[in-house]
Image (cartoon, helix red, strand yellow):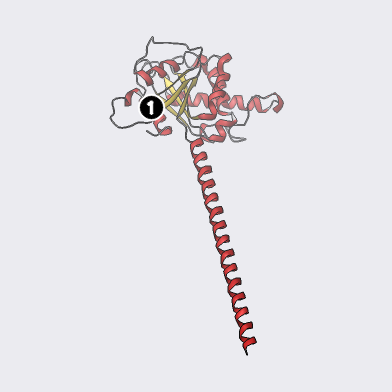
Amino acid sequence: MAADAEEEQVLLVSSLRQWDSWKQLQREEVALFSTFAVLFVTMVFFYVGKVLKRKVSNTILLVGLSDAGKTTLFYQLRDGSAHQGSVTSMEPNDDEFILHSESTKKVKIKPVHIVDVPGHARLRPKLDDFLPKTCGLVFVVDALDFMPHLRSAAEYLYEVLTKTVVARKKIPVLLACNKMDKITAHSTDFIRKQLEKEINKLRLTRSAISSADVTSEISLGVEGEPFKFSQCVNQVSTAEMSALNGQVEEVERFIREQVKP
């Protein structure tokens, strides 16, 4: 009997030790799982934060042919004045500021990074330096002297719209028709339709050339249909403005749609 009691006691002690070992192992597993869970959540938050930070941009590009009014528009947006009137820039005007029309507001406003890209054909490659960080494009057109420069404007706009980064990021484009205060200026509707017709010609001509010889990166429009800006993957809209007289409200509205205050 004493031997049986002693054996039972040994078994009990052994069982208790096994139980303690199992509980300890369970606690270690829970601690390890908690560590991995915390690490996983931390990595997810880090990744999401990095992605969100990368997606948020406040850069607006002013592009278009030389003498269209881009630099005057830049000064109006920043300073509320035209400075020397017609100014041709050979280097990008690059600055971050609160729009002049918002400078008197007492609430905190997010500044806008505006880049005036030179319109000279030789200097246009500078556009590619800014596009990856861009959230909006303002393509300035001279509405007064439009027809003599229609082909050149269409070619430049075609080049912009067919860039991979513009299509991939769906960067919105505003066709800002300048000098609309002049009686003989063409209407925004006329300018839009003429640019669509000219881009359609370019599209048909370039689609007939070997892809190895085409500099554009993507195709525009719908095959078999006349080109319309509504067919673009990104939004293309129009606006009236007079940079010299400071009538740039529609451009400012477009900017603030892309860069929330």
If the image is split into quadrants, where does the C terminus sit? top left
Where is residue 65 drawn, in percent x and y?
51, 16
Q: Label 1 belongs to which residue?
A: 252
Q: Residue at x 63, y 29 (%)?
A: 217
Decide if residue 210 is in sight here: no
Q: Height in image: 91 above or below 165?
A: above
The residue positioned farthest toward the front in the image shown: 2
Q: Residues within 10 Å of mark 1 (few under 14, many from 20)?
A: some
Q: Nearer the viewer, residue 17 or 213?
A: 17
Where is residue 236 drawn, in percent x and y?
48, 31
Q: Height in image: 238 above or below 124?
A: below
Which amino acid type corresponds to the residue marked 1 in the rendered image?
Answer: Glu
Q: Is residue 240 left or right of residue 55?
A: left
The residue positioned farthest toward the top in the image shown: 84
Q: Height in image: 10 above or below 4?
A: above
Residue 70 lies in what quarter of the image? top left
